[in-house]
Image (cartoon, rainbow, N blue to C red):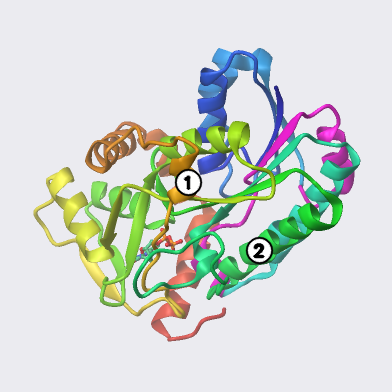
Amino acid sequence: MRLLVTGGLGFIGSNFIRHMLAADRKVSIVNLDLLTYAGNPANLSDVVGDYGGRYRWVKGDIADPRVVRRCMAGADAVVHFAAETHVDRSILDASAFIRSNVVGTQILLDAALRHKVGRFVHVSTDEVYGSVASGWSREDDRLEPNSPYAASKAASDLLVRSYVVTHGLPVVITRASNNFGPYQYPEKALPLMITNWLDGKDFPLYGNGGNVRDWLFVVDHARALELVLRRGQIGEIYNIGGTHSCTNRELVEQVRALMGINARLVRRVPDRPGHDRRYALDCFKLKKLGFKHAYGFVEALQSTVGWYRGHEAWWRPLKKGGGYQKYYSRQYAARLQGRTAG
Ligand code: TYD
């Protein structure tokens, strides 16, 4: 199977590529990735050595039809990860989110149509459902995105749906809960917490920390995506949830115990505007396809903490970089002044 993966130098995309190349010797992958701030060739340096003959990175933009068409030619299937994903950044400035997540998806869909690609997996998020006070979101629930990020993903999901209905493009959509694991850019809650604590710095906890997230180990996410790629029904949507639902306060305590941190190292900061209280997914459809998680939450969290401990050379340069520093000063200046845009 010749796969076109978009955004394969990011966190989930790189874990998926590593998983697929190891799982199936008949898979070869072209990875179309622009190398934005969240992408990193180091995420796949082991893959280049081990599977170089079956893996190729093309540096390019999914919103550029020429490079997309070139990469699409000869692909049997597409797995589309490329997206701007950080809610806090979308609050500061939503324009990159519209360009990559909406326009980029449309350009990919058009190219997939033109090249008669056999299957297109669109990787989306539970955030499109909005906050659910109780119960679990099902795939046919109404979309009520609350952040500009979530709205851009909901827009792309609807666009994808329209290509199935109007053009018969063989598309499947997945919506995953909060991922964690190796190679996650340290602006997201878990890697930020772990790396700050390794440096004896505070983790900024938004609001009262009562927001609930469902934690999915990225390797299990990659396994679920392989299943949907191979066995998912065309035109269907599959929720991919995790194994552990908890408040951010509880998460802080679990990571603290695991890392053996005695000091408090948590600073309450003003809440994220529009902060969704709770996400929760009903995963009946995925289970019916035969999916079972392979990793328990505690062992996955342990291995993630171990990975960040053992890979300082990966995350330290990212946190020291000018882009990261600039984002953080902007983010907290806005937050502390109660503003939502810079
Ligand atoms: P995040 O990793 O940004 O994922 P998402 O917003 O997509 O769920 O955040 C996870 C949770 O942690 C979310 O409720 C916001 C919260 N959070 C903090 O309390 N402090 C932080 O510095 C960050 C980045 C997130």
The image quarter containing residue 272 is: bottom left
Q: Nearer the viewer, residue 134 or 271?
A: 134
Q: Nearer the viewer, residue 186 or 103?
A: 103
- Amino acid type at circle 1 is Leu
Residue 215 in sight here: yes
Identity of the residue furthest to the bottom in this view? 338
| Res. 97 mark | 2
Screen quadrant of the C terminus:
bottom right
Distance of label 1 from label 2 (alpha carbons):
21 Å
Rendering coords of residue 134 (x, y %): 34, 72
Which residue is label 1 attached to? 318
Screen quadrant of the N terminus:
top right
Instruction: Decide if residue 226 is on the left or right side of residue 26.
Output: left
Q: Residues within 10 Å of mark 1 (few under 14, many from 20)?
A: some
**What stretch of residues is rendered in magenta?**
62-91
The image quarter containing residue 67 is: top right
The residue depicted at 70 percent of the width and 44 percent of the height is: 34
Q: Nearer the viewer, residue 139 or 3?
A: 139
The residue depicted at 68 percent of the width and 66 percent of the height is: 155
Rendering coords of residue 62 (x, y %): 76, 48
Picture layout, residue 29 above or below residue 180: above
The image quarter containing residue 89 is: bottom right
Q: Secondary structure at mark 1?
A: helix
Rendering coords of residue 234 (x, y %): 69, 44
Q: Nearer the viewer, residue 15 or 246?
A: 246
